[in-house]
Amino acid sequence: MARKLIFLALSIIVASCAAEPPRRGFWLADFLAIKELPYDSPPQVIYRIDDHRFVTLEHYRDCNHGDTYYNDTVAGIRTYLARGTVENYQGRVINADPTGKNLVVPGAEVPEYVCGDRGCNPVMMYSTDSGRTFYEKNYVNNSFNPFKYSKDFIIAATKDAVYVTEKLGETISQTTTRKYLINPGSIYLERDKLPDGAPFVHSPPAPTGLRTPSGQDRYTCDASIKPTNPDAPLVK
């Protein structure tokens, strides 16, 4: 009789467990793959170029996991940038093209991202049409910790070029700069390969005095602002 009661109790427990779907925590793969993030966090401006041009972080779980958009309220532009990348760039970014046509918005992988044996190739997104369209270009190859490594970079857009300046070490002040000449309306920087004849110069003198109109040269995020549903399921 006792054995029957024990068997019956175990059967009830097994049945109740089977009826309830398994609980899951936050999975990066689901976060990156899902079509629409469920988080109800309010948009944050994480980078401001001037009074009407800025980058927002939206639908974020925290300051490292969300969607980013480029906004120009005067021109009526709102362009999706990326998920889990822009907000993780730790270096400096300067948009100093006085025409407003050339823009650069670098990113990096989330802190917990595993890059594998060949490392990661974080990208900078750039536009030559005032932010209506963005393309991607790797600013470093084969990095095993792009979140941390990105702090060594200064990436700047001017009226005719994008400059990528990298610090060469933790204890020295030397840097190296790569310069990519760009032409409004072109996509010179797409897919790592410049077209024949397009200039690529190692270690040119980077312009001095470059400045974003707002003065902001780093992304900022208020970590105290959180969604009310950080554990919302990520369902494809």
Image (cartoon, helix red, strand yellow):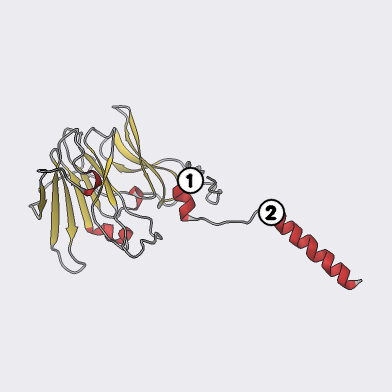
Tell which of 214 and 70 is nearer to you.
Answer: 70
Amino acid type at circle 2 is Glu
- Above or below, 210 relative to 108: above
| Mark drawn on residue 183 | none
Mark 1 or 2, nearer chain start: 2
Q: How far, Cα to Cα, is label 1 from label 2? A: 23 Å
Residue 93 can be seen in this image: yes
Identify the residue at image location x=10%, y=55%: 203
- Kindly state the secondary structure of the residue where label 2 is placed: loop
Amino acid type at circle 1 is Ile
Left or right for 70, reference 130: right
Residue 225 can be seen in this image: no
- Residue lying farthest to the left in this orientation: 205
- Residue lying farthest to the front in this orientation: 196
Identify the residue at image location x=17%, y=32%: 99
- Above or below, 90 relative to 129: below
Identify the residue at image location x=25%, y=57%: 141
- Residue lying farthest to the top in this orientation: 75
Residue 2 horizontal/vertical position (percent): 89, 72
Quadrant (top left, top right, bottom left, bottom right) of the N terminus = bottom right
Residue 105 horizontal/vertical position (percent): 27, 44
Q: Pointer 2: residues within 10 angstroms few (<14), some, or many (20+)?
A: few
Residue 64 horizontal/vertical position (percent): 40, 52
Q: Which residue is mark 1?
A: 34
Residue 195 horizontal/vertical position (percent): 15, 43
Q: Which residue is mark 2?
A: 20
